[in-house]
Image (spheres, rainbow, N blue to C red):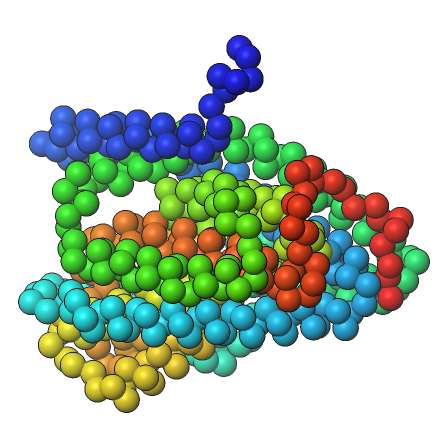
Amino acid sequence: MPNKFKLSLTKQIFIGLGVGILVGWMIHYFFDGNPHVKEQAIQWVRVLSRVFLSLIKVIIAPLIFSTLVVGIAGAGSIKAVGRIGLKAMAYFTFATMLALVIGLVAVNITRPGDGVNLPPEQSKEAKEIAERAGKQSAQDHIVNVFPTSIIKSMAENDVLQIVVFSLLFAVAVAGIGEKGKPMVAWCESLSEAMFKFTAYVMNFAPWGVGAAMAVTVGNKGLGVLINLGKMILTLYGALAVFILIVLVPIALLIRLPFKRFFQLVKEPAMLAFTTTSSESAFPKALENMERLGVPRRIVSFILPLGYSFNLDGSTLYLSLAAMFVAQAANKPLTISQQVIMLLTLMLSTKGIAAVPRASLVVLAGTLAQFDLPLEGIAVILGVDELMDMARTATNVIGNCLATAVVARWEGEFNDAGNEVVTPIDASSVKLH
């Protein structure tokens, strides 16, 4: 078949999405009267999405490790790495604060929690989330940033711990000079192999995406689209406002090529939206931002760092969700209490894992701190997956933009782009 008739990955994903909705509706419609058969059908369909996510997750650790080591070793000096890191954290803090403020303003305007009757008992899942949140003290949160075993961190896909280890390891490799070149060359080969591995896995994406959507619709039916609609619309509206009044002006300020950025970010954003996992979008985002014109040493540093410290969609959602529970419980919070909540979330969202439902753990801890009923989580769980889609996609878009911001800030953004992502010659990398 000629190449001109070959569907792009984005089109294949959209087709998979549509087929998934149809299959999910059929499962829900034909088997709704037989819960056991319906659950079995859903579990078999879920196999495809579980396989896809498993293949994606196995890429994350080696890709972050190898690209960070090569990227930092190629930075020219450790001071350059520190400078880039400080600029990134400054930008992350700015974007996170604006996301939290927009979430608070939106929920105070629409007040989606008014009139919601909280269930008298917590669901089993809500109890488990609250229990996990209660086990994490502020001191534990800091200590857990540093891995006790890199093998364990990689096995659990703890992105922040992998990043911390990779940074320290890269500095150590740079510190041994010429002896470090073989390690840099090995990491470069590993990263190239993982990019090729990613290309193979992406061929399976339409199946995994379709299955994930079929499971959602099969469980809750098409009615899931209107369940707690006001809450969902408030979140989607707030995220749209955040993109329009925060991300777009930033893109204009750094003279970002909009059309090219949109073309390159739509695939990773769609993967994140349909799978509700930033992990699924990471390999494609890493490759596409380099094609946009961001140097590999910057994108391989900023993107994984942003997955822990720049989750714009998740932070906006958390401020909105916490206020939703307060409204649903008829426990109004004063302006000063809302400001304290905003600052609390500002800190607690740093380092949360970019995986499904991690935000609910932080939410449970925030609700407990402000004496709000954890039963509110049970209400949100009913439609959390729909909201998770939007906030995860926003996380990916925000982090892709962050790589371009830092590259432009450093004066290293290539406006012409890099159509072909070429390997780095390890022999030319300067180690200090």
Residue at x 32% of width, y 84% of height: 339
Q: Is residue 277 above or below residue 102?
A: above
User: In this figure, what is the number of numbered marks?
Assistant: 0
Say left or right for 93 vs 225. right
Quarter in which the C terminus is drawn: bottom right
Residue at x 67% of width, y 68% of height: 84
Say left or right for 365 vs 148. left
Q: Is residue 134 visible?
A: no
Q: Is residue 30 above or below residue 347?
A: above
Residue 306 on image: x %, y %: 54, 62
State the residue in front, 415 or 130. 415
Residue found farthest to the right: 178
Residue 428 on image: x %, y %: 88, 51
Q: Is residue 246 visible?
A: yes
Q: Is residue 89 above or below residue 265?
A: below
Residue 370 on image: x %, y %: 26, 82
Residue found farthest to the top: 1
